[in-house]
Image (tube, coloured by chain):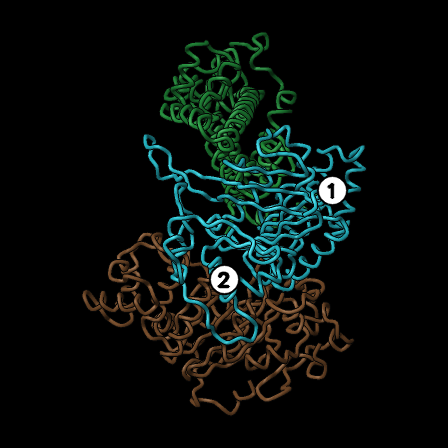
Chain colours: A green, B brown, C cyan
Amino acid sequence: MDAGKRISKFLRSEGFHNFKHNPFAIAGAVIIFLFLLTAVFGPHLVSQNPYDLAQLDLNDSYKPPIWQEGSDPRFILGTDDQGRNMVSAIVYGVRMSVTIGFCVTMICMTVGTVLGLISGYKGGRLDSLIMGLVNVQLSFPSLLIAMLVLIAFGRGVWKIILALSFSGWVTYARTVRGTAMAEKNKEYVEAAKVIGFPERVILFRHILPNVMTPVIVIATLQIGTVILSEATLSFLGIGIPITEPSLGLLVAQGYNVLFSGLWWVSVFPGLVLMLLVVGMNLLGDFLRDEFNPRLK
Amino acid sequence: MTMTEEAKNDNGVLLEVRDLSTHFHTFRGVVKAVDGVSFSLKRGEILGVVGESGCGKSVTGFSVLRLIDPPGRIAGGDIIFEGESLLKKSEREMERIRGNKISMIFQDPMTSLNPVYTIKRQICETLELHEGLRGREAHKRAVELLRLVGIPSPESRVNYYPHQFSGGMRQRVIIAISLATSPSLIIADEPTTALDVTVQAQLIKRLYSLVRKNNSSMILITHDLSLVSGVSDNIIVMYCGRVIERGSSEAVISRPAHPYTVGLLGSIPKMAGEREMLRQISGMVPNPFDMPAGCAFCPRCEMAQSICEKEYPRMREIEEGHCVCCHFAGGRGL
Amino acid sequence: MDRDDLLLEVKNMTKKFPLSRSGPFEKKKYVDAVKDFSISLKRKEIFGLVGESGCGKSTAARTIIRLYKPDAGKIIYDGTDITDLEERELRPFRKKMQMVFQNPYSSLNPRHTVKEIVTQPIMFHGLAGSRREAEEKAMYYLDKVGVLSSQADRYPHQFSGGQRQRISIARALAVAPDFIIADEPVSALDVSIQAQILNLLLDLREEFDLSLMFIAHDLAVVRHVSDRVGIMYLGRLVEYGPYSSIFENPLHSYTKTLLSAVPVLGKRTIDSVVLSDEVPSAPSEDFEGCVFAHRCGGSTERCLCETPVLKEHDPGHFVACWRSEM
């Protein structure tokens, strides 16, 4: 079926119909779409790269947003202590958040799904081993694990991605394992064996497509969690180094001066974070309900 | 049945279903699961409702008990039980009828019983609710009921949990529960389909004798024509939500009139005699969202003429008590 | 039976499964799902295997086709002993033996199109030069079973139960096997559709020279399609022979019970033989004696302690029962 037919078929489907009529889902999708646009194109559109020290002027520091007294028309939402344009800072921060969220989720999804598939399908000792690992992982708070990894390896964007991926794969593994265990007893899997397909073909070509549905739901909901985790780590000072953009860092910096009346440094990034996560959750919730097999 | 007009209240008519329609409103359109079904049932009669999957026989059974949940609703017609309209009753009044005067046996013995309660608890629940029995009296009656349905050592087994019984045993327990209140009507929806053939034979024999002994009526819903021919007095055949043939068991089985019934009977392989090629009914059941105008069976019918496409046939009596919904049947049996 | 005509020979095949209730430190207990199962199958023959739930017919089928490995006995396919072959060595046999399953709703991968489902096996076994050729072949088989080429790009859930079974049959045919095991292929279908599929199978048997092992619990269906019929009870084959002989002259008590329990059109309820309701579960591996003894009307001492052996009673008609010899 060519792309055009697939698209029109999708638009007529029950799923899309439910989506159209669900204001929350639409809101979520719109928000996410805007954020994606921001992440990709934003940096080209704003005037300043706030992380290029050469472009900053300390004289511009702590200018308030445009509707307050003492503001500078160049800086709509004000500036932070380094003179960074809040708008630019936020845009770069969003790009960072989305990138980290996406990378971590992709890594966790891949590792978790593969391990879950193998675990569920093969069973036996391998299953016990992998699930043992999962249980150990789960008994530690994920943020704590991330912190330990960062302390061990130091700071930096890729190290953060690694740290957050350490515990994120676990949910996928468990869910996929359950689904794989259910699917492996189905007759289409037996049929595949009777045809003679080797195990890896059965696992990846036959069973994998059937476990993807819950995986997508988990992924959508996880991106939000990851973004918040990164923000938390950065806020605590052990996440992204100060030379790189991060919404969490902005919140942290603004936190110190929050009660001196210089509210915009924390509040705007905080609002943006909140909006991003809410958007992901709205869409994720919708997907989860939509994919939930209804019995009638 | 034509008897209906004359045999109104009493004359032993227990249940009368008049032009019943039950519709389901789904995303893709309205499904007329039951579309103008009429039949009646006398006291002590066993009626077989036969048809293949999707014909609306189960929905008809559920409709009688008003067990239709949204997106389904009873869209038209009436159901008269013991002289009163069930559709006009409140939910409260229906609760006093369900499990009491009309009870139901469902298809899947594995899920019809609550796995976390003992059999005794489940039987006594009914006894308590409808007969007001408690304590030792209820216990005695429960054991009696189990003995009645043929469960060995009922005194000890009454305390078992459902998972300790086999499928056949569970169905017996369900029959026991359904008979506990001596209902005037039992609706059995494919009670033996999930069971092995030897177990099925046992069970249907037991059910039949108990129903007769109590002088209860039974509506036996099934796709198995052979089974129904062995137990029921009368049969109605359903297709696409409508009754297309009705008559005594003997008449419908030995002198089927509607081409669908003929085809159905011809599709059944025989246990003895020549092995002839099975007669198949070509095509498939129509899409419920895209029902043909005129006779629903027309696209698959060998005898179809142009009138069949345009006009829905009326129910005609071809011999005493034997009616068929077809423009042409009654002339040619195939 | 002429040696050249023999396609499949199964000798004393046994398949055990562990009883899950044994703890980690107890010696593992096993149950004989199939015990001492022996039959031979000729080319172009249809052998019907009947029994009630738990009799082991599905297990027997899956063991013969090497989805499981037998714990004892031999499976000889077309002269080669395939009992202990590893998966890689079995590969060439996979295109000679195929299977059609019972449940039309779970025997096709819901995420693959119907065309893909039938094309994959052709590609895998190298039966076509290119993908296009494989797809053409797939369409050929789909057409043979009555699925239109315009529908080939659809997904299984868009088809009815009967159509899905047809697709399953096309998938099995696609590798041009000599032998197909059909495990309850029509049990989940309505009677009128069942007739279509049965007629289709019989036609395909003629056209493609297939041998079929037809497994079912519906006796009338089995009688209709089979050349020979075998009856299983609790893992054992208790009787087998030409269909006419089995149905007109059943020898084993269980066979007689089974036959009398089948409802017959027009026959009023029901003078069937009374059996106690409990169908026991398969006996453990050290069981001796006739599995049916305690439910049989006339079991003797011998029946309780000595396992009966299949012996020829009438031409081609074998039964495992001490009473039949008396």
Same chain, labels 1 and 2: yes
For mark 1, give the secondary structure: loop
Q: Nearer the viewer, residue C159 or B254?
A: B254
Give the residue pinned by disc 2: C258
At label 1, which amino acid type do we have? Ala
The image shows residue A107 at horizontal and vertical percentages of 54, 23
The image shows residue B170 at horizontal and vertical percentages of 38, 59
Can residue C199 be seen here? The reply is: yes
Would you say A50 lies left or right of A254 here? right
Would you say A211 lies left or right of C294 here? right
Task: Kindly report the distance in space between the C-alpha atoms of the residues bearing marks 1 and 2.
Answer: 36 Å
At label 2, which amino acid type do we have? Leu
Label disc, if present, on residue C176 of the rendered structure: 1
For mark 2, give the secondary structure: helix
* In the depicted structure, whether residue A23 falls above or below residue A156: below
Q: Nearer the viewer, residue B129 or B222?
A: B222
Q: Chain of mark 1?
A: C
